[in-house]
Image (tube, rainbow, N blue to C red):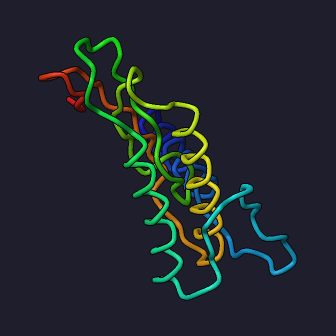
Amino acid sequence: MYRERTTVGLLIFSALLAVACAQGPVSSEQPPAATPPGSNTDLTGTQQSDWAAVERLEQQVKTLAKVAGCESSASCRTAPVGSRPCGGPRYYLPYCAKTTDSAALFRKLDEIAVAERAYNAKHQLVSTCEFRVPPAVEAVGGSCVAK
């Protein structure tokens, strides 16, 4: 009896999780996702050209995130990059808080997240719903690296 209840409970939980993570079609009546002022992302093309626009923003972030200049691991940080269809960042980027303009970095990260959410909605993408944990970072040879 206990085993049957456990199995039924797991099936119900799995079904609820699947429903919670599913993304339905986007209504054409929804307004387009807001793009931050000064954004240079234009999501009006094909899926390939729209992704290229997101990747251009990502390259700008990688330029802003400085990893060099940290002698101590206490100054190393990670920043969330992107927005997966089911939520959360695609990955975390290590950076040195001493040598990085954190305000500029996080403004650009917000811009990427908005652009990627718009991309995901426009192209009706879905993804898995696992939680991605930021990696531990440490200073190695004066640079911040993910462990």
> Residue 89 vs residue 42: left or right?
left
> Residue 66 vs residue 11: left or right?
left
Q: Residue at x 39, y 31 (%)?
A: 78
How many callouts does the rendering have?
0
80 or 120: nearer the eye? Answer: 80
58 or 12: nearer the eye? Answer: 58
Q: Quadrant of the C terminus?
A: top left
> Residue 37 vs residue 13: left or right?
right
Res 38 → quadrant = bottom right
Res 106 → quadrant = top right
The location of residue 100, given as percent across then percent down, is 42, 31
The location of residue 80, given as percent across then percent down, is 47, 40
Q: Residue at x 45, y 74 (%)?
A: 52
> Residue 102 vs residue 29: left or right?
left
**Does 143 sit above or below residue 64?**
above
**Does 57 sit above or below residue 105?**
below
Q: Residue furthest bottom?
A: 46
99 or 116: nearer the eye? Answer: 99
**Does 2 sit above or below residue 44?**
above
Q: Residue at x 61, y 66 (%)?
A: 40
Q: Residue at x 65, y 76 (%)?
A: 122
Res 32 → quadrant = bottom right
Q: Residue furthest right?
A: 29
The location of residue 101, given as percent across then percent down, is 49, 32
The location of residue 31, given as percent across then percent down, is 84, 70
112 or 2: nearer the eye? Answer: 112
Q: Residue furthest left?
A: 141
